Amino acid sequence: MNQNKTALAFLCHPDDAEFMCAGTLALLKQKGWQIHIATMTAGDCGSATLGREEISKIRRKESADAAAILDAQYHCNELEDVFVMYDKTSLLKTIEIIRNVKPTIVFAASPQCYFIDHENASSLVRTACFSCGIPNVDTPGVEPYTSVPYLYYSDSMEGKDIFGNAINPSIYIDITSVIDTKEKMLCCHKSQRDWLMAHHGMDEYIESMKRFASKRGSQINCKYAEGFRQHLGHSYPQDNILKIELKNLVTEK
């Protein structure tokens, strides 16, 4: 098994990691882990007033600024927002990032979520984790990475599927001690306040993040928590490295 203390949050849009797993990333950083944050898209549809190139430039900068709070590196697959497809081109780009980063832990979007972009992003990361060590999957200039990493799926937005059914985590991380860091990272995404209000009808996105983290925290008797499900299919690591690293901050259900 790979022993690099490197964690990669590979989600779909800028601010997804900050909403869903930044607290856990901050805790791993405290334990000496190197952190990387990647997105499938620069979020070029995330504005009601700016064009795609302009908002993409802004959101790349916001993502890099948020990552810098953890001394992390930001990567972008540069796929088109709303058009994140599970296809060969997108998959090879995803594999290339994983091969370059060489993570031991990968965090992905929930396989069930409100937005098909998120679900396709989850599938791309899942296949890339499995395929990154296959020599005949060619990514020119980037060598295969032989270890299948630990793969954790973050919560879906609001913790439910498209039918409103609850999606319950099997792993909870107490992030109470780093909620300020998570908030600071999400605050970097200033461009999204107006967009979320215009399209999602959601204002105070910081408070919505904290309310959901509080809900997860209440399920394990702490103030704030993040929830995950571990991919335990064939060839993936079967132990829980988050429990090993974060110890009593982790509750398994």
Image (tube, rainbow, N blue to C red):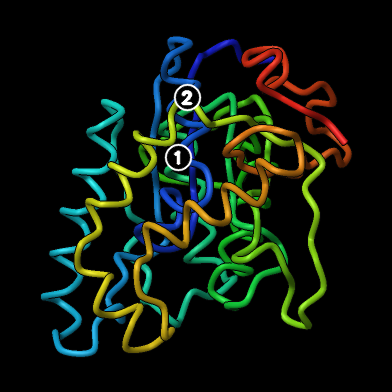
The residue lying at 14 percent from left, 76 percent from top is 53
The secondary structure type at the circle numbered 2 is helix
Identify which amino acid the numbered label 1 is placed on.
Ala
The residue lying at 69 percent from left, 13 percent from top is 247
The residue lying at 35 percent from left, 78 percent from top is 196
Of residues 97 and 18, the one nearer the viewer is 18
The residue lying at 52 percent from left, 43 percent from top is 21
- Density class for disc 2 (Cα within 10 Å; few <14, some 14-19, many ≥20) is some
Of residues 57 and 189, the one nearer the viewer is 189
**Quadrant, the C terminus:** top right
| Distance CA(mark 1)–CA(mark 2) | 12 Å
- Density class for disc 1 (Cα within 10 Å; few <14, some 14-19, many ≥20) is many
The answer to whether 132 is drawn above or below residue 121 in the figure is: above
**Residue at which label 2 appears:** 177
> Whole-percent x and y of residue 210?
48, 51
**Where residue 110 is drawn, which disc sits there?**
none
The answer to whether 112 is drawn above or below residue 76 in the figure is: below
> Whole-percent x and y of residue 128?
60, 48
Of residues 41 and 16, the one nearer the viewer is 16
**Quadrant, the N terminus:** top right
- 203 left or right of 7 in image: left
Identify which amino acid the numbered label 2 is placed on.
Ser
> Whole-percent x and y of residue 179?
43, 36
The secondary structure type at the circle numbered 1 is helix
- Quarter of image, res 151: top right
- 217 left or right of 44 in image: right
Q: Specify which label sits upstream in the sequence, 1 or 2.
A: 1
Foreground mark, 1 or 2, reads 2
**Where residue 22 is drawn, which disc sits there?**
1
> Whole-percent x and y of residue 105?
59, 29
